[in-house]
Amino acid sequence: MKPDEDREWFEGTDEGTFAAAARTAVDNAEAEFHRRGQGNPTEYDVRLRVMAEGPLSGYKVLISPSG
C-alpha cells in the first residue's frame, strides 16, 4: 500500500449511513477517473469517520484506489 501522502482520496458523506457515504465517494472517484480518461479501479481502500457536530450528525467515507 502506498503511503498516505502519495495517495489521492475521494470523499463521500451522508447523514444516514456509511454505505450511502461510500456510494457517493465511489461515484465521485469514478466521475473524476472518467473525466481524466482513466479506467475505474476495482477495489478501494477505505477510511470511515463519524461526524459529531452535536449528536451524531453524519458519516464520512474517504476512499483511495487500492495498490
Image (spheres, rainbow, N blue to C red):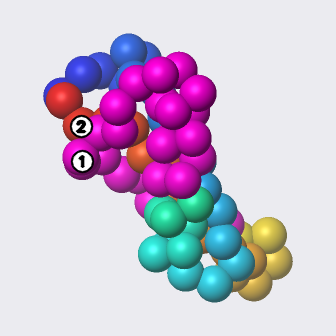
Residue beneath the point at 55% across and 81% down: 17
Q: Please tell me whether residue 9 is drawn above or below residue 53 in the rendered image.
A: above
* Callout 1–callout 2 Cβ contact below 8 Å: yes
**Amino acid identity at mark 1:** Glu
- For residue 4, say whether it is visible: yes
Q: Please tell me whether residue 65 is drawn above or below residue 43 in the rendered image.
A: above
Quadrant assignment, res 55: bottom right
Give the tally of numbered discs: 2
Marks 1 and 2, how far apart at CA: 6 Å
Residue 5: image location, x then y, percent = 42, 17
**Amino acid identity at mark 2:** Ser
Give the extent of the magenta segment: 25-51
Q: Nearer the viewer, residue 60 or 30?
A: 30
Q: Secondary structure at mark 2?
A: loop
Residue beneath the point at 66% across and 71% down: 14
Q: Please tell me whether residue 20 is drawn above or below residue 36 in the rendered image.
A: below
Indicate left or right for 41 with 38 as reference: left
Residue underneath mark 2 = 66
Alpha-carbon neighbours of circle 1 within 10 Å: few (<14), some, or many (≥20)? few
Residue underneath mark 1 = 43
Q: Secondary structure at mark 1?
A: loop
Q: Nearer the viewer, residue 40 or 12?
A: 40
Indicate left or right for 1 with 62 as reference: left
Alpha-carbon neighbours of circle 2 within 10 Å: few (<14), some, or many (≥20)? few
